[in-house]
Amino acid sequence: MAENPPISQPDRLRLAGSVALVTGASAGIGRAIASRLAALGATVVAAARNRTALDALAGEIQAAGGHALACPADVRSPAAVEALARTALDRYGRVDILVNNAGIGFFGAPLHQTPPDAWAATFETNLDSVYYAIRALAPHMIERGSGHIINIASLAAHNPLPNGAAYAASKGALHQLTVSVAEELRGLGIRVSLVCPGSVDTDLSPDLVGGKDRSRMLRPEDVAHIVAMLVTQAEQSFISEVLIRPTRKP
């Protein structure tokens, strides 16, 4: 597994004093993002359904000198997301960075063979959870006059994905949600950004179904590097969307 690029000493405290809430943090891209933000000095609230994996992540971050709180939560539930936000705010008094990364996919069948429950679960996780989290935390960010929301989508939001139409549709909808919310919050000191990776070597990747070359795929750490770039950009700049592609096609 590739590692994050080394962080220079001056950059280690770039996010000191800030709090980042990361969903889908138990594995893959979310885990890499949580680790990267913690390495930059942020206190990370790591959310997912797998408590064991979250506890392991929090332990690794703390062993490296960082700060993390494992918060098991099912982000498909608006009540659970409200409780997650309240836990973070009650404990730390602020959430500066929200990374909506939780995602699932149903691949390997055309749309007309996609079960309704798979369609519903895909949208509940990939789109509805983002709405719940923004609804829960945007008022706090508005009150403070600052914040950064980063939504992890996919190049499937822009490109055809045969046998993955539900996933592509959810990410396409997430794209439009993000750019719209970005304009709603832009004048209030809150930046909303979208990251669209191509093929990433995780258990979710639809490319694994097709037997493509995993060695040519992006790594979760590549996405984490982009997130770190976004949350440390100069105050006067606003990067609305980043597309990430493997150097060589898998």
Image: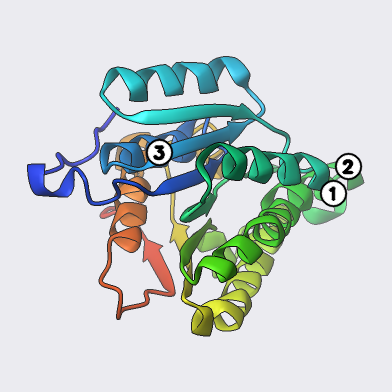
Residue identifier under label 1: 120
Res 219 seen here: no
Q: Residue at x 84, y 49 (%)?
A: 120
Question: Element at badge 3?
Answer: strand
Q: Which of marks 1 and 3 is in front?
A: 3
User: Does dot 1 land on a helix, a strand or a loop?
Assistant: helix
Asked whether residue 101 is in view, the answer is: yes
Quadrant assignment, res 220: top left
Answer left or right for 235 relative to 86.
left
Label 1 or label 3, whichever comes before in sequence order: 3
Q: Is residue 128 above or below residue 38?
A: below
Q: Residue 235 location in percent, x, y?
A: 30, 74
Labelled pair 2, 1 in contact (Cβ < 8 Å)? yes
* The one of 78 and 197 positioned closer to us in this rendering: 78
In the image, residue 204 above or below residue 223: above
Q: Hey, what amino acid is under mark 3? A: Thr
Which of label 3 and label 2 is nearer to you? 3
> How far apart in space, not on screen, are marks 1 and 3 (Cα)?
33 Å
The residue at the point 43 percent across, 30 percent down is: 68
Expressed as whole percent of the image width and height from the top left, the position of residue 245 reads: 35, 58
Residue at 44% across, 23% down: 58
Disc 1 packing (10 Å; few <14; some 14–19; many ≥20): few
Q: Do the residues labelled 3 and 2 touch (CB within 8 Å)?
A: no
Q: Which amino acid does label 2 sit on?
A: Asp
Neighbours of disc 3 within 10 Å: few (<14), some (14-19), many (20+): many
* Label 2 SS: helix
Q: Name the residue under label 2.
A: 117
User: In the image, is residue 131 above or below residue 217?
Assistant: below
Label 3: which residue? Answer: 43
Name which quarter of the figure residue 142 lies in.
bottom right
Q: How many labels does the image show?
A: 3
